[in-house]
């Protein structure tokens, strides 16, 4: 029997979730990371909405500025 390896940086969402489900010890950390991620997305969308811009426009402008 082989031991499940930690998913790499290019792992699919499915592979990552299977790994998390098989390791209950990391559930609290994963939940905290997920909450932080969702909170960041909400803050970004609120920032765009308050500024009067669409999210896609802000992302496009950021991409163009990074070139």
Image: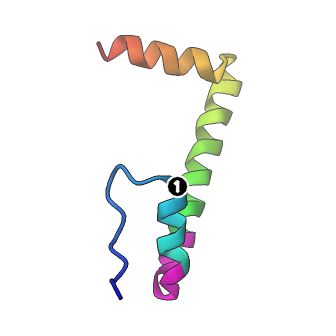
Tell me: 28 left or right of 55. left
Number of on-image labels:
1
* Up-down relation of residue 42 to residue 33 (above or below): above
Residue position for label 1: 13
Q: Residue at x 33, y 53 (%)?
A: 9
Query: Range of the magenta residues?
Result: 22-31
* Up-down relation of residue 17 to residue 27 (above or below): above
Query: Where residue 52 sits: x, y (%)?
Result: 69, 17
Q: Residue at x 47, y 13 (%)?
A: 61
State which quarter of the image contains the C terminus.
top left
Tell me: 13 left or right of 66. right
Query: Where residue 40 sits: x, y (%)?
Result: 56, 47
Query: Where residue 21 sits: x, y (%)?
Result: 56, 78
The chief SS type of the magenta part is helix
Q: Residue at x 47, y 88 (%)?
A: 25
In which image quadrant can residue 46 be found?
top right
State which quarter of the image contains the N terminus.
bottom left
């Amino acid at each position: 029997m082989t031991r499940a390896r930690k998913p790499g940086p290019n792992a699919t969402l499915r592979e990552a979730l299977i790994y998390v489900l098989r390791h209950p010890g990391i559930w609290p950390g994963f939940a905290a990371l997920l909450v932080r991620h969702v909170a960041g997305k909400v803050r970004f969308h609120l920032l765009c909405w308050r500024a009067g811009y669409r999210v896609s426009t802000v992302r496009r402008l950021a991409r163009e500025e990074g070139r």
